[in-house]
Structure formats: structure tokens, C-alpha cells
Amino acid sequence: MLEDPVDGKIRAPEFQGITAWLNSKPLTMGGLKGKVVLVDFWTYTCINCIRTLPHVKGWHEKYAKKGLVVIGVHSPEFGFEKDVANVSAAVKEAGIRYPVAVDSDMRTWQAYDNRYWPAKYLIDREGNLSYVSFGEGSYDKTEMAIQSLLGMKPKAAKQKPPAYMFDQSPETYAGFSKSYGLGSGLACDAKGCNVYIDPGEHALNTIYPHGRWVQESECLELQEAPGKLAYRFNAREANMVMAPVKGAVKAEVFIGGKRSAALKIDRPKLYNVFTDGKYGERELEVVFNGPVRVYAYTFG
């Protein structure tokens, strides 16, 4: 947890249990004294983190020469996000140039007593906590807090708040550890009792597998192709966190029964499966031609 107050202020903890440092040699909070530090807790398949990244990268570009050090602490949600090679590829793909601490064992996350992705902790030149922001939004307030600690006159461009509808579909997990239940029934055959049968009619915000799937703690794993997942949602866009079991897997995306896209699932990451500027309710089906793991659905 955050260290005890010093002179009435809360000292930021040191980085702990870091598996690897990307874009930098190892850093310490003690060694950064005299700098303003922005610690950004994130993970590379988190859609909220992905939408926040342009702002974090922008602050790094604007204020690094003025004394700001941005450090992304990558604390994983799924097992494959502990792999340094996966994180390194994601950092490169996202164009992140500031230091990233790979917190695979969640020890720095625990030291900060953090609970959210993304979470931003702004630390002053003496190493004390000055400002905290959780989730998306508040970009203008965060930037003005940065400017203030750098000794600048606070002034930030007004940012539009993230577009969110009250009935937007929530993040939905496929694994049994966080699942609220699947919509399909199970049947048995000569190979076992892991054949899911899609009933054809779908309630909102529920995953409907069809085919030979196994529900693991973190994911649904397709054991034998072809296999299908159906999901009825309210949003402008839909994303799925997926990974191939062996080699690359091809998939077809259907919206309202009409084929809308083809996907190549070749590494563990978040894949956009549908985007439309118009908000609304839609029926999504994804058909897979090979073994795949599906971890979560996210929406925007």
C-alpha cells in the first residue's frame, strides 16, 4: 500500500517485483526525485487503457523536456499478459516510447493498493503523491495537475468526455472465474459432455457458445472446429480478447446474420470485430475455423 505520510504527505512506493523494463534501464522512485512522475497502471488488452493511451503519449511528448517522467506499469489481467514478449510487442504496436515496467506478479500494483485499469498516480518532485485519476476521462484535469507540478500556469484544452450510453453492454468475461453464466445448453456425445447447443434466441449481454468448447478459469477454449459464439449487444463497437491455441486461426464475423468481416487471430490481444458510428442493438456471431481461446468482450 502507499507508504505512510511524510510531513503530512503520502510518499509514493518504490517499484516492486518488476519482471522487465521496456524502453528504459531500471528506474527507482528514489532516483527520480526532482522529477514529476506520472505512473500509469494499464494492461494491453484493456479497451479503457487503449482509449487512454493517446493522452498519456501526448503528455510524454509535450512535457518530458520540462521534467515529466511517464512510466507505464503493465499489470496483467490475463495470464498471457504476463509474458514479456507479448507486452513488448504490444508496446511497439502502440507506439509507446516512455518507460514501461512489466509488473507480471502484480507486486507494484499491490504496493499502490491499486484496483483499476487504467489508473494514474501523479507524484511531485519530492516523491509524494499529488493527484490520482481512475478510468477514462478527466484528461483536462490531469494535464493541468501535470502543468501545476511542473511550475507552469495550468491551462489545458477541453476534452470531450468519453461517449457512454446508460444501456451500453458491459465488459463480459468468458472464463468461469468472472462469468455470470453462458446462455447455451450442454449436450454429450461419444467424445464427451462438452458440446454446447445455441438455442437460437439470445438475451442481451450473454455469451452463447455452439460446438465443442471447454470453459476454463479465464477463457472459453474451442476444442474442435468449427465453433461459434453469439452475443447480442448495445454499442457502437465490439471487441474481443482472443488468442490462437496453436497456429493462426481464421474467423468470420456476422452482424444480424450478414457476413461483415474476416479475422486472422494470430496472437493474444484485443481484436475489433465491429465498428459503426451509430449506437444500437445488434446480433453478433463469430465463427472460428480452428482452436481458439476467447477471454472477454468489451464495447464502446
Image (cartoon, helix red, strand yellow):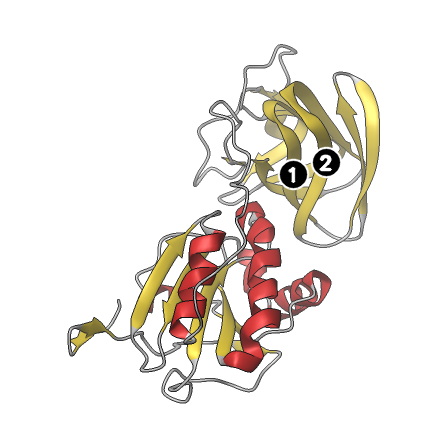
Residue at 66% across, 52% down: 269
* Dot placed on the residue nearer the N-terminal end, 1 or 2: 1
Using the image, determine if residue 58 lies above or below residue 198: below
Quarter residue 254 falls in: top right
Residue at 42% across, 55% down: 141
Element class at badge 1: strand
Q: Are marks 1 and 2 in contact (CB under 8 Å)?
A: yes
Quarter residue 239 falls in: top right
Residue 106 visible in the shown view: no
Q: Residues within 10 Å of mark 2 (few under 14, many from 20)?
A: many
Using the image, determine if residue 151 lies above or below residue 156: below
Q: Nearer the viewer, residue 61 or 75?
A: 61
Residue at 66% across, 11% down: 200
Q: Nearer the viewer, residue 90 or 149?
A: 149
Q: Quadrant of the N terminus?
A: bottom left
Mark 1 sits on what residue?
A: 239
Mark 2 sits on what residue?
A: 273
